[in-house]
Image (cartoon, helix red, strand yellow):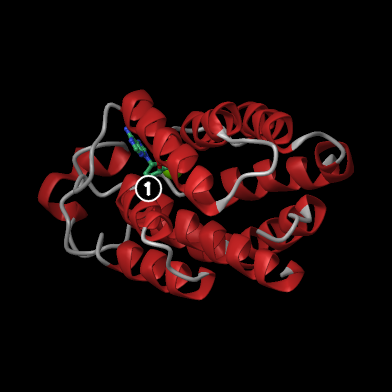
Amino acid sequence: MAPLNLARLIAVAADTIAAHAEELTALDQAIGDGDHGLNMKRGFEAVRAEADAFAAKPLPDALKAIGTKLVMTVGGASGPLFGTLFMALGKEIAADPDRSGLAAAFGKAVEAVAARGKSQIGQKTMLDVLQPVHDALAADKTAAEIADIADAAAEATVPMRALRGRASFLGERSIGHMDAGARSTALLVRSVGQAIGESA
Ligand code: ADP
Ligand code: MG
């Protein structure tokens, strides 16, 4: 794979989250408490502020440090879960991973999120995007295809009934709205694809 420009990737991800913060807030207002946009923006701006320091580290250490920063800054239920995703990815990934190594490490990271959230696919959470993204990575799909799969997976949370997180308190009334964490995950997946595409 082309060498990863991590500083650029962080900038694209933070820009994307900032541009969609109001949308994420609105999604979380419908079936949660409305803080997801601000939570994600705060976390990714904190990562952006230290982008050069992260980018100077070997990839596994950089991912672990980003995960730790997200745990400290995002807050809510999603902070520890996104933090776990990045920390576990950093723990599993090689310094210069090939595609199958990346897919395997991402698979372990998704398992770590599921364990941390005591959640599984179909419960209307970020996992409903993470799992199909892992499957697409393992199936050698292109970055653009993976981004489309992530968007479709977020869209597919609309008819689901939430069984985890705050939205689960609403029971049937959670049906008909997209899960905010599924949407933010799809946005991050597209930013990663975009940043990698630029450096390829
Ligand atoms: P909070 O729910 O504490 O307000 P956020 O609004 O930042 O935190 O994040 C909510 C998102 O976190 C949800 O949309 C969902 O995708 C994700 N989430 C919440 N609980 C879980 C869980 N147990 N497993 C997986 N994802 C979860
Ligand atoms: Mg919330």
Residue at 32 percent across and 56 percent down: it is 132
Q: Is residue 103 left or right of residue 75?
A: left
The answer to whether any part of residue 9 appears in the image is yes
* Residue receiving disc 1: 126
The quadrant where residue 77 appears: top left
- Above or below, 102 against 149 in this view is above
Residue at 81 percent across and 52 percent down: it is 7
Tell me which image quadrant ligand 2 sits in.
top left
Front-most of residues 10 and 91: 91
Residue at 66 percent across and 41 percent down: it is 43
Residue 67: % across, % down: 62, 32
* Viewport quadrant of the C terminus: bottom right
Q: Is residue 89 left or right of residue 51?
A: left
Residue 23: % across, % down: 50, 65
Q: Is residue 46 left or right of residue 26?
A: right
Residue at 54 percent across and 66 percent down: it is 190
Front-most of residues 108 and 155: 108
Callout 1 secondary element: loop
Q: Amino acid at mark 1?
A: Met
The quadrant where residue 169 appears: top left
Residue 71: % across, % down: 59, 28
Front-most of residues 191 and 161: 191
Q: Is mark 1 within 8 Å of ligand 1?
A: yes
The answer to whether any part of residue 35 appears in the image is no
Residue count near mark 1 (Cα–Cα under 10 Å), binned few <14, some 14–19, many ≥20:
many
Q: Is residue 161 left or right of residue 31?
A: left
